[in-house]
Image (cartoon, rainbow, N blue to C red):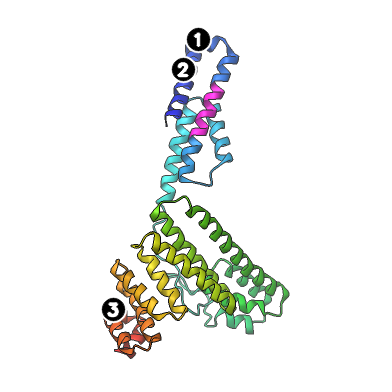
């Protein structure tokens, strides 16, 4: 901030000397040199501040700020900083909207109908069924392309079904989409592991939690490969344990470890993790169904009933929890 203020003062003095026709105004070369230096310093300072909000801002931002500072002395630097700060503030606070998509286990193509939006064309068959029975390859190709932007847990089944399609374009597109998803997640894991080395305890714990979540996403893509599945579960568990070791009060890390332990058939570890997550403030309606699942895997049927009974009745009126509650209570 002091560097920017110094650049503004320097530019102000140069502009004042030019207006009053005194000082360095009689030496155009020196005046231009002072103005260019002040513009460079101001642009660099503004770019530095912007990068605190937008880490991806770089050379283009500097060129933009330098052009304004050079073409509009003094006012350009102040206006750039004010405009960028206001724009970033508005951008960070404009995403105030309701959850829009309804995700289901067997969604219609490729999503179910958005909430509060009229359905223009009804189709009860799912994406996988259309891949098997549809005779419109162009339509299926577009849907496979769209599936690349869908959450992995919802799209992986359709994409793997598309890999077996007879149409080369559909098959290769599905394969490339899965490969891109896997490559992206692996790169993200490497970036996060590098970032975790220089972070404080809370940020480092959350970073390891994100790494565990990325391994979980990879697991949805590699779930049909037994060896890969075992390795990914082990890595996801290790990342979640790292998050807990660094910050034992990270309730989301305990919850994630519990879900991973369920897939590893470690019911005792899962039960302890879910109990700890709830003790740290995890909502009962979120963690208790998984606690019931851990009890079921351990063949503790009384524990299943007790877990279901602890969930508020309001949450047990909707599927699939209503069916589970009706059976166990």
In the picture, which quadrant includes the N terminus? top left
Q: Nearer the viewer, mark 3 or mark 1?
A: 3
Q: CA distance from mark 3 to mark 2?
A: 70 Å
What SS does tag 1 mark? helix
Residue 287 position (above or below residue 85) = below
- Where residue 164 appears, x then y in whole percent? 67, 80
Q: Which residue is mark 2?
A: 13
Q: In the rendered structure, are the residues bearing label 1 and label 2 in contact, judged by CB atoms less than 8 Å apart?
A: yes
Q: CA distance from mark 3 to mark 1?
A: 79 Å
The dominant secondary structure in magenta is helix
Sequence-wise, the earlier of marks 3 and 2 is 2
What SS does tag 3 mark? loop
In the picture, which quadrant includes the C terminus? bottom left
Q: Is residue 122 magenta?
A: no
Q: CA distance from mark 1 to mark 2?
A: 9 Å
- Where residue 259 appears, x then y in whole percent? 42, 74
What SS does tag 2 mark? helix
- Where residue 44 appears, x then y in whole percent? 52, 33
The answer to whether residue 166 of the structure is visible from this angle is yes
Q: Say which of 247 and 188 sits in front.
A: 247
Q: Which residue is mark 3?
A: 311
Q: Which residue is mark 1?
A: 23
Q: Which residues are magenta?
A: 35-45
Sequence-wise, the earlier of marks 1 and 2 is 2
Q: Quadrant of residue 143?
A: bottom right
Q: Residue furthest right?
A: 168
Sequence-wise, the earlier of marks 3 and 1 is 1
Q: Residue at x 54, y 21 (%)?
A: 35
């Amino acid at each position: 901030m002091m560097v920017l203020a110094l650049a503004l003062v320097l530019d102000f003095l140069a502009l004042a000397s030019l207006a009053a026709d005194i000082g360095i105004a009689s030496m155009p070369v020196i005046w231009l040199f002072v103005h260019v230096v002040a513009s460079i310093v101001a642009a660099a300072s503004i770019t530095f501040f912007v990068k605190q909000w937008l880490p991806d801002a770089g050379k283009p931002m500097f060129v933009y700020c330098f052009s304004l500072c050079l073409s509009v002395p003094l006012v350009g630097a102040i206006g750039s900083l004010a405009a960028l700060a206001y724009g970033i503030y508005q951008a960070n606070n404009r995403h105030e909207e309701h959850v829009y998509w309804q995700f289901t286990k067997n969604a219609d193509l490729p999503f179910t109908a958005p909430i509060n939006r009229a359905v223009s064309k009804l189709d009860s068959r799912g994406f996988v069924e259309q891949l098997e029975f549809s005779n419109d390859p162009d339509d299926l190709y577009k849907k496979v392309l769209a599936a690349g932007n869908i959450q992995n847990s919802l799209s992986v089944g359709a994409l793997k079904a598309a890999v077996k399609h007879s149409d080369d374009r559909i098959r290769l597109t599905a394969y490339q989409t899965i490969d891109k998803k896997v490559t992206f997640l692996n790169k993200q894991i490497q970036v996060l592991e590098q970032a975790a080395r220089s972070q404080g305890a809370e940020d480092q714990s959350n970073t390891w939690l994100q790494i565990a979540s990325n391994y979980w996403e990879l697991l949805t893509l590699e779930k049909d490969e037994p060896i890969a599945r075992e390795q990914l579960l082990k890595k996801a568990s290790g990342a979640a344990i790292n998050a807990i070791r660094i910050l034992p009060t990270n309730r989301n890390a305990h919850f994630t470890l519990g879900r991973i332990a369920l897939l590893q058939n470690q019911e005792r570890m899962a039960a302890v993790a879910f109990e700890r997550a709830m003790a740290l403030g995890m909502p009962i309606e979120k963690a208790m169904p998984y606690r019931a699942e851990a009890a079921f895997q351990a063949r503790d049927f009384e524990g299943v009933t007790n877990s279901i009974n602890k969930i508020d009745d309001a949450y047990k009126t909707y599927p699939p929890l209503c069916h589970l509650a009706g059976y166990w209570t």
